[in-house]
Amino acid sequence: MIKDILKSNARRYPNANAIIFKDIRYTFREFNERINSLANALMDMGLRKSDWVAMIADDCIEHVELFWAGAKIGVATSVLNPALLEKDLFHLIGNGKAAAVVCGYKYRNLVDSLRSTLEGVKGYISLGLSDEDFVGYEDLISTSSSREPDIEINENDLLYFANTSGTTGLSKQVVHTHKSLFATALMDLDAMNYNINVGDVSLIGGPHFWAYLLPRITIPCFYMGSTLVIPPDLTPQGFLQSIEKEKVANLTTGTAFLQQLMDYPDLDKYNYSSLRRIFIFGYYPPDVWRRAVELFGNIFVVGYGLSEIGLITFLPPEDFIFDGHPEKVRRLKSCGREALCVDAKW
């Protein structure tokens, strides 16, 4: 079960880095203890299985901790886009009946503006200090037991709500269970030829509110005993500094971010030779892929899928053929081959 991955890693790799963000580093032992404390604190607040927690904050370690704490007690989580309008946030939090709201300090006023319209919220948690309106996040962790929660989890229990972009209306929540997210993790790992090793470093290269990017990256990463790095910001400099400093082997990102990296004038000033695999979502024409391969090497896996079901098709490195037989060259213009357990009709 997903809930046991960090417990196992804390036992097998207690002193290895689990997660890195700016100057914060936690080993698997430390990380698992913090997550246990958070899970127990959420239960002490009255949260129970099938409840869910809304998170409104810029990308941070707390997003990851809340997801994995929820996994241990059957509480689902959802990272919301802080840039959404109040009516959109109310639609997700209020109509979705969130049991708790966690917010970054600078979003407290935004959450306060919604408070009077929300019903059934059992707790408001701030990533800042405690006061009469919010419970401080670190206060919750420091005052709660770090024992492993003893909650029976079923594979069909709720785990994460991915949020659609709302292109044709209000954003909608896509429900994922323990079973569905573990399945998508195996599909992604298969597409990458399981090229994540114990002790590798993986970078999450996109905003955490993107669909289900957060669990999609962290589950395979921790399942394989890898370290997760959250960049200080989503800029080429932020990516490249993290890659160089932490010797990142695996990067998961989108074509828009890759384009920024390729166009960054100071790209050649950074050492990114540690990169072994870039798992990327989105389409490029072959001439752009040719340039990407010239800069980074033939290390790309291109994924196509849906928020509802995960990976559908993918293009592995061996399909990045630019010259030669037309049958082989044309593959790069396609959406690739079927992902694991997918039966596609062409």
Image (cartoon, helix red, strand yellow):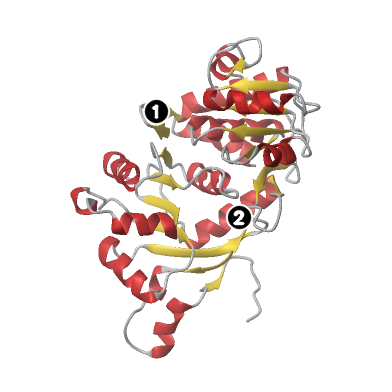
C-alpha span from label 2 to label 1: 27 Å
Please state the horizontal and vertical placement of residue 237, each as a whole percent of the image.
30, 44
Q: Is the C-beta separation of discs 2 and 1 under 8 Å?
A: no
> Looking at this rendering, what residue extends furthest in the left direction?
269
* Number of residues whose C-alpha sits closer than 10 Å to that of mark 2, classed few (under 14), some (14–19) or many (20 or more): many
Residue 335 in view, yes or no: yes
Dividing the picture into quarters, in which one does residue 97 lie?
Answer: top right
Residue at the image position 55 percent from the left and 32 percent from the top:
57
* Label placed on residue 260: none
Quadrant into which the C terminus falls = bottom right
Q: Amino acid at mark 2?
A: Thr
Q: How many marks?
A: 2
Please state the horizontal and vertical placement of residue 251, each as a whole percent of the image.
40, 51
Quadrant into which the N terminus falls = top right
Residue at the image position 44 percent from the left and 52 percent from the top:
252
Q: Which of the marked residues, 2 or 1, is nearer the chain's N terminus? A: 1
Dividing the picture into quarters, in which one does residue 119 lie?
Answer: top right
Q: Nearer the viewer, residue 162 or 155?
A: 162
Provide the secondary structure element on which disc 2 rests. helix
* Label placed on residue 25: 1
Relative side of 166 to 282, left or right: right
Q: Amino acid at mark 1?
A: Arg
* Label placed on residue 184: 2
